[in-house]
Amino acid sequence: MELLNDDLIKKDFTKVGSAEELPQASYSSAGMLEDVNNVMVLTRDCEKTKVAGFTKLDEEVIKLIEIEKPILNEAITIIRKAAPMMEEVELLVDAASRLSEPFLLVIVGEFNSGKSTFINALLGRQYLQEGVVPTTNEITLLSYSEVESENFERCERHPDGQFMCYLSVPILKEMNLVDTPGTNVILQRQQRLTEEYVPRADLVLFVLSSDRPLTESEVGFLQYVQQWKKKVVFILNKLDLYRNSNELEEATAFVKENAMKLLTAEDVTLFPVSSRSALEAKLSYSKNSDGKHSTEAMYNDPRWRSSKFFELEDYLLSFLDSSTENGKERVRLKLETPIGIADRLLTSCQRLVKLEYEKAVEDLASIKDLVYGANNYAIKLKSDSSSWQNQISSLIERAKGRAVTLMESTLQLSNIDLIFAYTIKGKTGSSMRATSFVQNDILSPTLDDAVNLLGDYSTWLSSSNTREANVYLECFCERWDALVAPEERALLDPNGLVNEGEKLTIKALEGFNASAAAKDFEEEIRELAFGTFGGLGIAGLSASLLTSVLSTTLEDLLALALCSAGGFPGRRKHAIDKINKAADELSRKVDEAIQKDISQSANNLIRFVEVISKPYQEACQRKIDWLQGVQGELSAVERKLQTLKVEIQNLNGS
């Protein structure tokens, strides 16, 4: 911001000299200087009748205080409920406790702006140390004490780091002063102390140095003050640095213009003073025991008149007179101080609760989406299990192919001896070599391979289920760990997802017996041979007769028998079809078992996720309901404060 550039400020307002006499102060009859305990201070006539400040309050103000305190306590309670970690609530607690305490005037400014000199001039004695280096390292609260002795001050350090000093100065009866470290101190802790005291202030006096008004740190601090909507009175100190009235007017115009922008105010109150000249004058005349003559001499002292300090004192003391407009404003400022803090904290709480509410709603939606997403596990399993199905189907298909090949090779003309053997032995003969081959070389190895393969498949399925369940468990714990206490979580073992249902594929093979299947194979051949040739009487021929017949004659007889049978090819096809059908049926059963495994595993996972998610969903819903209730309480107390604020603004018909 070029307007507030330090170089421009220094160029325009660091001229030192006294070419022209500065205008003399004009005095008000509202107050008078008095020598109190050899200290020259300003008092008001009203102070003697004890109507100033909060020592005597009219019924309307007392009623408002009685209304305000319980509302503030309600605000404190709901703020602590909504934001337990918000330490700033102690500002509200302190401000509420000070409702009936003296008016709190907080003096801020850069460390070399003359704050300590200003306070000493206001109090009429050199109570605070002055210097060109930072002299105030802590917050110092100046309060009134009845003690009147040479030991004029008593200071105590409180646990929070601030000093409490008790002085026998009349103005402190109705107005406490707070001296702060400064807006440009090196230590962040001191900066924090200064900033923390601003919200508690009923009125902020911002002391600027004439040689560098509105520096970067002062601008930043004013922006902070503006956030708390505090009334600020500017003190342009060291006015004796200006050589003439034109320079003073330029400086005051500059400060006012920029202060109004920073505070977004239509006007600001500014007093150019020379605190050092005022203090020197007061110290000079405080030594005179004749109070009346001291006061008269003070009015005529050039240092006092040129300091323009009387105008500032008159303005401040007018705040202590409830009959003046400033006095009425003082009451309003005092009552509004805790309300302003409460407003700011309630706004922060509402924003915080709103964010938490939105997050809770989002969390609940995310949990529900996560539960719903478990339905996709069946699709994933089906896709991942296709390779297992293909391997098992391929295994059965190869066994089927070998069995069909064996059947075809057995039931052909070149194997006539075997066919006649089956025909002659009929249904009571012993097992043939082909039967042993089917059982030992085709079916048993295939069945063993299938069992092993399905065992691996079952292990894979179990691992997949457990892994998927653990993913959900970890997801809930990582994302929403704070929602549910460990003892409230569903205690489920992911391994429990593997139950009897996942052994369906093994059971599908248990119904298949290699020995029985081999016998069925042999029976098919025997049935085919006997059914084809047994009716032709060939079975009745003796072996010796058959062997005595020439080979050509045997071939002729076989040809005649085959021609007479006619149905042999059809019977052979039927036998092969039965093998295909049996193999296909086994493959179908295994496929169905796999699909049931997948479906059951998916359903188990869905139920598992639903169970473990239930405490989280319930916790989210409880949090949403709780936050909605808190939002309602925040809004309710805010409405009460706004109504109270209107009543305060209308106090005394203002």
Image (spheres, rainbow, N blue to C red):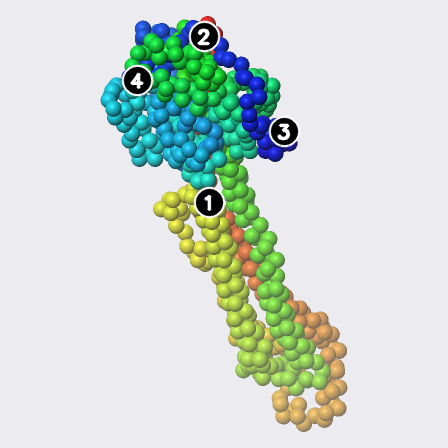
Q: Can residue 66 be seen in this view?
A: no
| Mark 1 → mark 2, Cα distance in angstroms | 68 Å
Q: What element carries label 4?
A: loop
State the residue in front, 68 or 55: 55
Q: Position of residue 445 (x, y in %)?
A: 55, 76
- As shown in the figure, which amino acid type bears the numbered disc 1? Trp
Q: Mark 1 sits on what residue?
A: 480
State yes or no: discs 4 and 1 in contact (Cβ < 8 Å). no
State yes or no: discs 4 and 3 in contact (Cβ < 8 Å). no
State the residue in front, 186 or 413: 186
- As shown in the figure, which amino acid type bears the numbered disc 4? Asn
Query: How many neighbours does mark 2 have within 10 angstroms: few (below 14), some (14-19), or many (20 or more)?
Result: few
State yes or no: discs 2 and 3 in contact (Cβ < 8 Å). no
Q: N-terminal of the two: label 1 or label 2? A: 2
- As shown in the figure, which amino acid type bears the numbered disc 3? Leu
Query: How many neighbours does mark 4 have within 10 angstroms: few (below 14), some (14-19), or many (20 or more)?
Result: some
Marking on residue 3: 3
State yes or no: discs 3 and 1 in contact (Cβ < 8 Å). no
Q: From the viewer's perspective, tell me whether residue 167 is left or right of residue 455.
A: left
Residue at 64 percent across and 73 percent down: it is 398
Q: Which of marks 4 and 2 is in front?
A: 4
Q: Nearer the viewer, mark 1 or mark 2?
A: 2
Query: How many neighbours does mark 1 have within 10 angstroms: few (below 14), some (14-19), or many (20 or more)?
Result: some
Q: Mark 2 sits on what residue?
A: 28
Q: In which quarter of the image is residue 151?
A: top left
Residue at 46 percent across and 45 percent down: it is 480
Marking on residue 38: 4
| Mark 2 → mark 3, Cα distance in angstroms | 36 Å
Query: How many neighbours does mark 3 have within 10 angstroms: few (below 14), some (14-19), or many (20 or more)?
Result: few
State the residue in front, 583 or 94: 94
| Mark 3 → mark 1, Cα distance in angstroms | 51 Å
